[in-house]
Each structure stands twice: as C-alpha cells, then as structure tokens.
Image: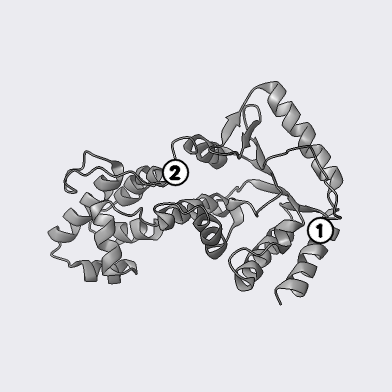
Amino acid sequence: MTVELSPDDATDPGPSPLRNFGNEVMLERTRMNMSRVELGRAVVCGESLVAKIERGDRVPQREFAEGCDQVFPHGNGRFMRLWRIALRYAYPPWFWPYVELEKKATVLRMFNPVVIPGIVQTREYATAILREGRPKGLEDIVTARLDRQQILQRENPPRLWFVLHERVLRNIVGSEQVMRQQLLRLLQIAETLAHRVQIIPDNGRHRGPAGASPFVLMSFDEGADVVHVDGFPRGYVLAEPEDVTDADDAYDLLRALAMPLDESTELINSALKECYS
C-alpha cells in the first residue's frame, strides 16, 4: 500500500487530498505565527513529522487531526473531515471498498490460518507483519490499519467471530514481547461476551476446506451478507448469493473443526505461558 504523491508544488492543494491536508495545516500554522516545533508540542509529535505532513509526505494519525482542530481557532472539525479524505492515500484503491463495508458491518466473521486479523492487531504486531512486505510508507500503512479499529470503540460496535489456526498463536511475529502483547489483546477479545474466538488445533494434519484463504463474512442491519477474500496480489469482495453461501458453508465447517470457546481461551492462555512468559 503506497502513498502516491505528485511532484508538483506542495502548496498547491490540487494534486491530492493528502497535500491539501498538509497545505491547510501550514496555512493555519503560519497564520498564527506558530513554528513547527510549537505545533509539534501542541499535538504531541516531532518537528520533522509536522514538516512531512505539511509536504504531503506522510499520512497523519487521527490524533494529529484532532489536535489541529483544538489548536487552530475555528477548526470546527475541519481537519478531521480533511483527514478522513487524506486517509484514503494509505490504502490501495482495491481495498477501500472493504474498509467502507467494514465500517457499516454489524457482525464480522473472520477466518485466518496465518496471522491475527488486522482489526485487533497491536501497533507492534501490525508493524512487524507489514514490514515483511518491504512496502513504501510503512508508517502510513500501519496508521491506516490501526485506525480501522475505531469501529470497536463506537456505541454499537460490530460483533467479532474469529476462527484461527493454532499456528497463529505460536509462530513468532516480531519478537516474543510483541507476541505476548498481541495474545493478551486476543485474549481480551475472547473474554468479551459480545465476541467469539475459536482455535483450530494443530494436530499435524490438514484441517479445513482445501486451499482456504483468509476471508471475512460481513453482515449488516440492512442488506445481504458479503464476503471479502484476502488474496495476492489483491483482495476482492464477493456479493453473489452463491459465493456468500459457499463462504457461509466453509465458515460453518471451520467452526465445527475448531475447539469450543472455553477451550480456545485456555489454549491462548497456554500459549502465553509456554511461549511468551
């Protein structure tokens, strides 16, 4: 996921929403006769990061936009509105439809045989996973991934149901400390009444639908379910009824192969103690 930037003058708001955001920050800052150092102190970041954001070289974090709305007079939420548009630059075009659907979903049923789903990844785990792909703009991609987790903080968050392979708990991503913090986060989800986490035990045999890729079944208050399949080089959304039915059947089979909820939680605890204590 690469942030594409135009070589045009950074003060021109036309090339991209990302540059437009940075231009508005620079205009307000200079209007207040405020240095980049002073703005950085006010929004809790460094001078160099302020400069990169003003040039359109970095996707700002949500906290930066919120801070600008507080620091600059008459912000009235303008920087958060601009930020939501600029955030698109941290996603590849093919992924944005999934992000929009994810925001509207009431239930997310996820299967992943390789990693813990991005919707509950810690910053360190997400950074370690994404770094392996040698992407440009790593910090921007991590910022975008973590911001998706805001849907879990809303008044009526979506319900999560994860089916994961046991190797997800034991394959080290980043470091043992990174894994410990990530499994504690997964355990928190497993122990939340609204959510479900089931683990498919690793008994040395293949279990589950042949060639099953990571996928998400999304349900909504209104409208039919849809499926997002995580593939290479890009994921894709399926909305045809027969495709959704096939995914639903596959998910039912995966849940049947997985351990019950309580036993899955115990297995997460065991992995924490055995591997990352």
Farthest residue, direction bottom: 277
**On the image, which quarter does residue 72 sit in?**
bottom left
Place of residue 255 in the rendered image (x, y in percent of width and height, measured from the top left):
81, 44
Judge by depth and name the residue closer to the eye, 203 or 153. 203
Tag 2–tag 1 contact (CB < 8 Å): no
Q: Residues within 10 Å of mark 1 (few under 14, many from 20)?
A: many
Residue flagged by tag 2: what amino acid is it? Tyr
Mark 1: secondary structure: helix
The residue type indicated by label 1 comes to Ser
Q: Which residue is mark 1?
A: 264
Quadrant of the rendered image containing residue 271:
bottom right
- Measured along the vertical axis of the image, is residue 106 above or below residue 170? above
Which color mode does the image show? one colour
Q: Secondary structure at mark 2?
A: loop
Q: Which mark sits nearer the N-terminus, 2 or 1?
A: 2
Residue 91 disc label: 2
Residue depicted at x 85% and y 59%: 263
